[in-house]
Amino acid sequence: MCGIAGAVFCEVTDSGIEKALKAFQRRGPDAQRATRERNATFLHARLSIIDLSAQATQPMTSFCGRYVIVFNGEIYNYRELRQELENSYRFQTNSDTEVILALYAKYDARLLDKLRGMFAFAIWDKQTEELFVARDRLGVKPLYFAAEGGRFAFASRPKALCLLVPEIDRTIDRQALRYFLEAGYVPAPHSIFRGIKKLEPGCFLRVTRQAVVQERYWSLDKVGTDETLLARKEGDLLDDLEALINDSVRLRLVSDVPVGAFLSGGIDSSLVAAFMKKRATGPVRTFTIGFKEKEFDESAYAEAVAAHLGTEHTRETLAVDDLMALMPRFIEEYDEPFFDYSAFPVMAVSRLARRTVTVSLSGDGGDEAFGGYHYYRIMCGLEATEKIPFSDMIGEVLKHVPKQRLKWLGEILAMRNPTSAYAFMRGVIKDSGGILKSSLVADTIPLAGLFVARSAAFPHGLSYPEQAMRLDLSYTLPDDYLQKVDVGSMAFSLEARDPLLDPTIIEWAARLPMRWKIRGNVNKYLLRQLAYRHLPRALMNRKKMGFSLPMAHWLRTGLKAWGEELLADTQGLDALELDAAGVRKLWNLHQQGRISAHTALWSVLVLLQFLRAQEHWR
C-alpha cells in the first residue's frame, strides 16, 4: 500500500515533487522517490509489505528498460503469475510490482484479467510515450486524475495532485456538490473539484499527447440472477461459498510483514477471522474498539468471537467523545468533504492495530454482496406494495403526517419508482429544510437521476433489492465505505485488505437469487448459515450495530463551538450555494432539541471545513 502520483506532457517543478511526496508521508513512510523521464515524472511513497528490499522501491523500471511503473496496492496471486512468466522475463526482485510490469510487457491491457488484488497503477511506455492507468474492479484503491490542454496528471489523493500540478482547476464542481449534499459522498467519475476526476472502478485509461481514452474491463452489468441456483441444495452452496472465501483469505495472508484482522463481532468480520485462523500458521491477532457507553459498545461480542477462535485479541476502550481528538487527523487526511463519521472509529481501530501489525483484514463487502443492510428489506417490502391498490395514494397521505419515519415511508410509496425511492432512502438530507439554493437544484441532476441512469445498464429482471445492491456496489461501496477505510487506515500507515471483495465472491454472489440473501426478516441468509458452521449461533444472531457515533449530541456539545465558527462563514455558505438563513434555522432548531438535523448539518460543516483546509494546499 502506497501513495502514487505522476504527470506526463506537463512541466513539474522540484518544489511540486517535494510537496506532493510530503502529502504521502503517512501512506508511504518507508521510502519516497521520484523519477523524471522524457515528458514524464513519477512519484512513489512506499509502505513496504511485499519484498522489503531496496530493489523493490518504486518507481520501478522493467528489465528491458522500456516500461516504468508506480503502483499502489497488492496483487495477491503474484507468485502464481510469476511462475508463468519466468521463462520469458528476467526478474530482478521478489515484488508483485515487477510481476505487473512483466505482464504488461506480454499482455498489454489483457493483464488486468489475470490480476487478483486491489490496485491503482500507471505504466509509462518510454518508446511510444503512452501512459496506461488502471484501477481495480471494485474500487478498493483510489485514483484521481486531471486532463486538460494535452497535460495529464494523476495521484492517490487530490491534495498531492494539486501540489504536484498547481494549475489544476480547483473550482467546486456544482454537480459533485449536489451529489455530496444528497448522498454524503461524491460518486465517480466526479470529484469535488471541476478539474479533477476519479477513475471509475474496473476501468483503465490510455493516455497519449493526442487523447485520453477510457475503457471498462470489468463490471457486473452482464451478470444476471441464476434462477437454477434455487434448486441447489443449501449445503452444496455453502460448500462453494466456503471454498471461495477460504481461497480469498489464503491469498490475502500473503505478506512479508505481520497481518491481523479487525473484529467487530458481526458476521462478516467474524467469518474473516475464522478463515484467517484456519489458514494461518502462527498466532492470529485481532483488534476492536470498545466504548464506555453501552449503547455504542459491541466489543463484548468481538471478545467472545476471539475467545472462541483462540486469537490474540486486543481491545482499546474509549469514551465515545475521545474520538473527537481524531478531528485534526480527519481534516488532514480526507481531501474531499467526507460525510461518513464512522471514519472516526475506523481511524481509532487502525491506530490500535498499527501498534503490532502493518496489514489488517476487514469484513467490508459482505453486506452489499449478500444482502446485509436493512434498506434491502425495505426494498423487498416496496416491491410487495406493487400489488396493493392505491399504494401511491396512501403514500401521498403519509407524507403529511408529523411523525418523521411515516413521512419518509410516504415519500417512498408515492414515488412508484424503486430506483428513485432507493436514492431517497440513501440520502442524508431528507429533512434539510430547504438549505440548497434553488439555482443549484435547478442546474444539476439529483442523486435519483444518477441512480436511474446507472440502473438502466443492469441485467433485465433484477428485483428491487437486487437493484439496490448493485447501486451500492457501484457507488456507496467504492466512493464512501472503501474510501473511508483506505484513508482512515492509511492515516496510520496501515494496509487494509478485504477478502469478501474478491471478484470471484462478488460475481458468485451476484448470481444468487434473493431467496439465498434475504429470507423473511433474515438478512444475509446464506452468509449467516456459513457463519454457523464456524461460530456459535448465539453470537451471530444479534442486531447489527456497525460503527455508530452520537453526532446529534456532539453537535450540541463537543463540536458546537467548531460548528458555530464555521457557520459564521456566510461567504463560504454562499460559495457552496447553501441558503445561510435556512442552515442557521436548522442549526438553531437542532440546538434547541426540537429536531435532530445532524446529518444535514454535519454535511454542511464538513463542506465548510473542506473549503478552509484546501485553501492551504501550497
Image (tube, rainbow, N blue to C red):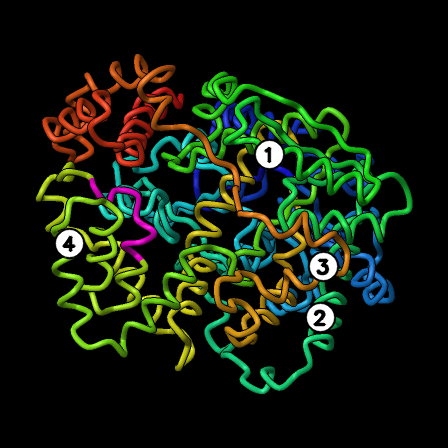
Quarter of the image where the C terminus is located = top left
What's the CA distance linking mark 2 and mark 1?
Answer: 32 Å
Count residues near mark 2 (Cα–Cα under 10 Å), then give few for <14, some for 14-19, many for 20+. Answer: some
Please state which amino acid type lies under the numbered disc 2.
Answer: Leu
The residue labelled by disc 2 is 238
The mark that comes first in sequence, 1 or 3, is 1
Disc 1 is placed on an element classified as: helix
Q: Tell me: 202 left or right of 195.
A: right
The Cα–Cα distance between marks 4 and 1, rounded to whole angstroms, is: 41 Å
Are discs 1 and 3 less than 8 Å apart at CB? Answer: no
Q: Which residue is mark 3?
A: 532
In the picture, the quarter occupied by the N terminus is top right
Q: Are marks 4 and 2 in contact (CB under 8 Å)?
A: no
Q: Which numbered disc, 2 or 3, marks the residue closer to the eye?
A: 3
Residue 491 painted magenta: no
Tally of marks? 4
Q: What's the amino acid at mark 3?
A: Tyr
Q: Which residues are magenta?
A: 423-431
Report the residue at 65% width, 51% height from top: 540
Could you say where residue 259 lies in the image, as x and y percent from the top left?
A: 77, 39
N-terminal of the two: label 3 or label 4? 4
Q: Nearer the viewer, mark 2 or mark 1?
A: 2
State which quadrant residue 104 falls in: bottom right
